[in-house]
Image (spheres, rainbow, N blue to C red):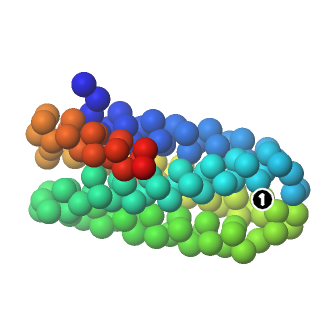
């Protein structure tokens, strides 16, 4: 049976792959456009589903309220960098600089979630909740 942590990790891996591909692209190329469009969609859809099916139940518990607020605040910070990239020409030399800062921010965020938040959440969720949340998260990601 899948649990919510495995499902979140799958998306995290996809984000990491797309980001490492993107930092090797240059100029206004099909590769840069395609990888970026995939990354943007993955980041946006994942953040919303993760807030609904991971952070929302955790924000209700005293033990995990602070980490949830922190995680959600980071999603906002990530959104801001995406907005900056959207406003930057694919051809602009600044594009890669912003992409590097997105990669840095997202990598740090994923690491913190996987290494600290998942452990804390693991103690708060019941086994049934872990698989139920996985199901709901997967449904939303597929929609
Ligand atoms: Fe996240």
Residue 20, image quadrant = top right
- Residue 83 in percent (x, y) is at 62, 72
Quadrant, the N terminus: top left
- The reply to whether residue 90 is visible in this rendering is yes
- Residue 128 in percent (x, y) is at 13, 36
- Residue 27 in percent (x, y) is at 88, 56
Q: Indicate left or right for 90 with 117 as reference.
A: right
Mark 1 residue element: helix
Can you say whether 40 is above or below 135 in the image? below
Foreground pick, 11 / 61: 11
At 23% from the left and 60% from the top, the residue drawn is 56
Q: Indicate left or right for 7 with 19 as reference.
A: left
At 73% from the left and 49% from the top, the residue drawn is 34
Q: Indicate left or right for 16 with 140 as reference.
A: right
Q: How many marks can you see? A: 1
- Callout 1 environment at 10 Å: few (<14), some (14 to 19), or many (20+)? many
Foreground pick, 63 / 137: 137
At 58% from the left and 42% from the top, the residue drawn is 16
Foreground pick, 29 / 103: 29
Q: Which residue does the numbered mark 1 point to in the structure image?
A: 96
- Residue 41 in percent (x, y) is at 56, 55
Foreground pick, 68 / 142: 142
Q: Is mark 1 within 8 Å of ligand 1?
A: no
Residue 18, image quadrant = top right
At 61% from the left and 68% from the top, the residue drawn is 81
- The reply to whether residue 114 is visible in this rendering is no
- Outermost residue on the top side: it is 1
Can you say whether 143 is above or below 69 in the image? above
């Amino acid at each position: 049976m899948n649990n919510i942590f495995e499902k979140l990790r799958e998306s995290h891996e996809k984000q990491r792959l797309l980001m490492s591909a993107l930092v090797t692209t240059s100029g206004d190329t099909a590769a840069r456009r395609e990888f970026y469009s995939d990354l943007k969609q993955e980041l946006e859809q994942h953040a919303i589903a993760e807030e609904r099916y991971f952070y929302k139940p955790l924000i209700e518990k005293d033990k995990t309220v602070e980490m949830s607020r922190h995680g959600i605040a980071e999603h906002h910070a990530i959104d801001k960098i995406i907005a900056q990239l959207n406003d930057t020409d694919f051809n602009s030399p600044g594009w890669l600089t912003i992409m590097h800062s997105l990669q840095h921010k997202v990598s740090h965020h994923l690491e913190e979630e996987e290494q600290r938040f998942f452990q804390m959440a693991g103690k708060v969720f019941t086994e049934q909740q872990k698989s139920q949340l996985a199901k709901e998260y997967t449904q939303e990601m597929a929609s």
